[in-house]
């Protein structure tokens, strides 16, 4: 199961085309007529469920607070580095932007065990 998305785009049908670190291109569609229901899809779906069960949710209290004072003191090591901070009591993922020397918010980090795909 890939852990990193390298690129994402869409096609003329509105499908998402995703290139991952495992050197696989995946296409996600909402069109039921074009959805794969074969063994490869079943294997992918099972891997997603297993990944959700084993993923680690960081302890909120252990995360550094993402305040105005901290923003200028915690720097990323390389372009695209992702780090989780506590922002107003919520775990949020940020990506390091080297050229701007700043963290860009990606989104809220959710507990995978609470997701729809978990058993």
Image (cartoon, rainbow, N blue to C red):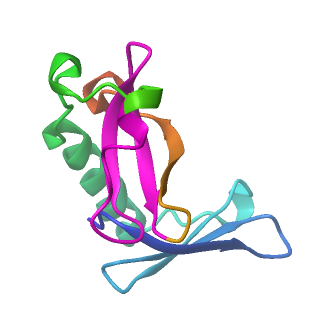
Q: Nearer the viewer, residue 53 or 7?
A: 7
**Compared to 101, does 105 lie above or below?**
above
Q: Nearer the viewer, residue 88 or 34?
A: 88
Q: Residue furthest bottom?
A: 23
Q: Residue 42's image quarter?
A: bottom left
Determine if residue 116 is in view: no
Could you tell me which quadrant the C terminus lies in?
Answer: top left
Q: Residue at x 13, y 41 (%)?
A: 54
Q: How many marks?
A: 0
**Compared to 1, does 59 lie above or below?**
above
Q: Which residues are magenta?
A: 70-98
**Compared to 12, does 112 lie above or below?**
above
Where is residue 18 drawn, in percent x and y?
54, 72
Asked if the stretch drawn in magenta spans residue 74, the answer is yes
- Is 28 placed left or right of 115 in the picture? right
Where is residue 81 drawn, in percent x and y?
34, 62
Q: Nearer the viewer, residue 32 or 14?
A: 14
Q: Nearer the viewer, residue 115 or 88?
A: 88
Q: Residue at x 26, y 65 (%)?
A: 1
Q: Residue 5's image quarter?
A: bottom left
Q: Residue furthest top?
A: 89
Q: Residue furthest right?
A: 12
Q: Residue at x 40, y 29 (%)?
A: 69
**Compared to 108, does 100 lie above or below?**
below
Determine if residue 55 is in view: yes
Q: Residue at x 36, y 53 (%)?
A: 45
Where is residue 82 drawn, in percent x and y?
35, 54
- Is 51 placed left or right of 9 in the picture? left
């Amino acid at each position: 199961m890939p852990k990193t998305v390298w690129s994402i785009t869409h096609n003329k049908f509105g499908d998402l085309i995703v290139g991952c670190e495992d050197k696989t291109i995946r296409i996600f569609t909402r069109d039921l007529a074009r959805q794969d229901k074969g063994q490869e899809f079943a294997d992918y779906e099972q891997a997603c469920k297993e990944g959700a069960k084993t993923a680690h949710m960081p302890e909120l209290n252990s995360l550094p607070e993402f305040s105005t004072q901290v923003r200028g003191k915690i720097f990323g090591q390389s372009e695209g580095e992702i780090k989780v901070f506590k922002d107003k009591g919520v775990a949020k993922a940020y990506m390091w932007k080297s050229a701007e020397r700043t963290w860009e918010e990606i989104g809220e980090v959710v507990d995978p065990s609470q997701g729809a795909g978990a058993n």
